[in-house]
Image: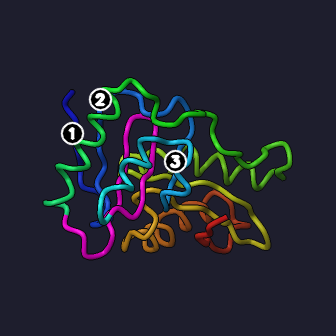
């Protein structure tokens, strides 16, 4: 098995590409070993020293190191854990059912439009950088979005959110006054 890796805009996060499907649908974002309960892969990665986050996408794994961690020392261990996990034949997540998504049936028309724009115009480029963006809600002119994976804690994420995503949403949906990152 040959695993490629890519740098992301977040200097603390690397994107690992095992060359096969990691999840059948959705994404998973783990910030602690306790969060990773159903993912043996994420649990194994958290057992490495200086791992601060694991994000699973369709065909990639983004791993975030703790401040002060050294990628030159960590990278071979992360590659080894990923290789060993996929060689075992185990799934990345025991129950591969995606977390609850926003219920589109409960959304008003503006929320549906914002979600569609985020899903079709923003999410693909964010995934290329090892992350994810989710529409959470729209209230009083503010679109609340959750950043995950390499995007969470990335120094350039707030600039991208404000100058890129916010400007695009304002252009297509004048009711959008601003965009805010949220945890839930």
Q: Secondary structure at mark 1?
A: strand
Q: Is residue 58 magenta?
A: yes
Q: Is residue 61 magenta?
A: yes
Looking at the rendering, which quadrant does residue 18 occupy? top left
Return the residue at label 2: 19
Give percent across and percent down for residue 75: 20, 53
Looking at the rendering, which quadrant does residue 149 occupy? bottom left
Tell me which label, 3 or 2, sits earlier in the chain.
2
Q: Secondary structure at mark 3?
A: helix
Give percent across and percent down for residue 45: 36, 51
Tell me which label, 1 or 3, sits earlier in the chain.
1
Crowd band around label 2 with a 10 angstrom C-alpha radius: few (<14), some (14–19), many (20+)? few
Return the residue at label 3: 121
* Residue at (51% x, 47% y) in the render: 121
Q: Are marks 1 and 2 in contact (CB under 8 Å)?
A: yes
In the image, residue 42 above or below residue 173: above
* Residue at (52% x, 50% y) in the render: 36
The alpha-carbon separation of the residues under discs 1 and 3 comes to 26 Å
* Segment colored magenta: 51-70
* Residue at (60% x, 49% y) in the render: 117
Mark 3 vs mark 2: in front: 2
């Amino acid at each position: 098995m040959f695993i490629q890796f890519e740098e992301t805009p977040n200097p603390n996060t690397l994107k690992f590409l095992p060359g096969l499907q990691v999840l059948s649908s959705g994404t998973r974002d783990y910030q602690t070993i306790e969060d990773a309960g159903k993912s043996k892969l994420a649990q194994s990665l958290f057992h490495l020293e200086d791992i601060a986050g694991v994000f699973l996408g369709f065909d990639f794994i983004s791993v975030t190191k703790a401040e002060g961690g050294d990628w030159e020392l960590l990278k071979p261990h992360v590659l080894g854990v990923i290789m060993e996990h996929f060689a075992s034949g185990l799934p990345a997540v025991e129950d591969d059912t995606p977390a609850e998504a926003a219920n589109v049936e409960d959304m008003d028309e503006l929320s549906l439009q914002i979600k569609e724009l985020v899903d079709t115009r923003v999410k693909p480029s964010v995934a290329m950088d090892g992350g994810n963006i989710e529409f959470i809600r729209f209230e009083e002119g503010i679109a609340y979005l959750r950043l995950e994976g390499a995007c969470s804690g990335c120094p350039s994420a707030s600039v991208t959110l404000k100058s890129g995503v916010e400007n695009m949403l304002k252009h297509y949906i004048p009711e959008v006054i601003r965009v805010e990152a949220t945890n839930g």
